[in-house]
Image (cartoon, grey):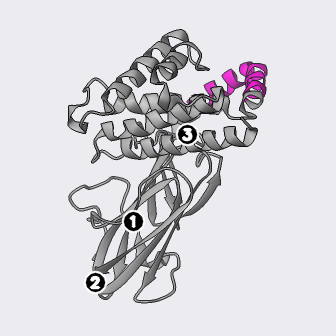
Amino acid sequence: MTNDDTAQWILRAREEVAAAFAILLDPSTRSESAEVHLLAAWGLLHRSVTGMESAADEEGLIHWIGTSAAPWSDDARARAASIVGGMARDASRPLFDRASSRGRRALTRHARELNRTIDHYEPGQRAQKATRKALLWRWAKVAAVLALFAGFVVTIRGTRDFGSGPWRAHFFPTPRFEHQPILQRHDDIDFSWGRKGPHERISGDEFSVRWDTCMLLPDPSKVIFALQSDDGSRLFVDGELVANLWSGGALRRGAGEVDLAAGAHHIRLEYFELSGLASINLRASLNGQKPAPIPTEMLRYPGDTFDDENPCASVAR
């Protein structure tokens, strides 16, 4: 087994986990659909570490997870082996007959742990983690003091960190739009964060963002929205899905066309990042013009609170 083989299997395992996340992050899907991807990812990881074909030896795979898979504790290995064993047993059964004990939340947590396990075995990762651990220990006392100060600042500032611009942005510390968001305002949607977090209080992996604005059209218009993102994104106009790139993985592009009447229209853009590079870009073509950022003079900030019934209620038509 060569290093190239190992790297290829690791890459394929990551792609399978990304596919599982894409399913688990979409509430309209059955979470059990992610299990085939999680099983495939475990098999590829096992093969990269041992050189053995896991598909031909499910018992060997489950034994390896329960006894050897790093960096899990013994209890965590046992739980993971139990979950994988259940998925393997149910793999041949119809989707609606699968065990209900493996819910969306449990599978999402399992996918995150699997992602960290892949990190552990990826060539070069262990040395980097050891270095990071040493640095964290060295600066522990300083970090404690800074944490106290940061807590004081957060208490004063709350979740508002506005800036300016017609786009309202909610940044969430998970890829499922969970927990208290950080609110900002932006002029345009064109971000390339790389491996850094989009905000000082949000990590570079596993976060989500929801942008929205109100677009004012003086006349009826045909609008083509062009979307590009890494990882997943999707665009809604007046609540209707127009462009859908809602899956994890590498950079992808898509577009959607819609005919809009004169007046105010609510534009909502949702984005999630799992791991690796992070970026998103939105452009629009109005009535056949060259795709470009939506002119700020056509956009209005929808307000600090969200109105589900009429998101653009505060905007004059």
Whichever of labels 2 and 3 marks the residue nearer the N terminus, that label is: 3
In this rendering, is residue 154 above or below 283? above
Please give the residue where the numbered disc 3 appears in the rendered image: 13
Q: Left or right of 191: which side holds 221?
A: left
Q: Is residue 2 magenta?
A: no
Q: Secondary structure at mark 1?
A: strand
The label shown at residue 213 is 1
Measured as percent of width and height from the top left, residue 73 is found at 56, 13
Q: Disc 2 versus disc 3: distance between alpha carbons? A: 48 Å
Q: Please, which residue is most extreme toward the top here?
A: 74
In this rendering, is residue 98 above or below 230? above
Q: Secondary structure at mark 2?
A: loop
- Count neighbours of disc 2 (C-alpha within 10 A) and say few if under 14, some if 14 to 19, many if 20 or more: some
Which segment did they paint magenta? 129-151
Q: What amino acid type is highlighted by mark number 1?
A: Thr
The main secondary structure of the magenta stretch is helix
116 vs 93, nearest the viewer: 93
149 vs 284, nearest the viewer: 284
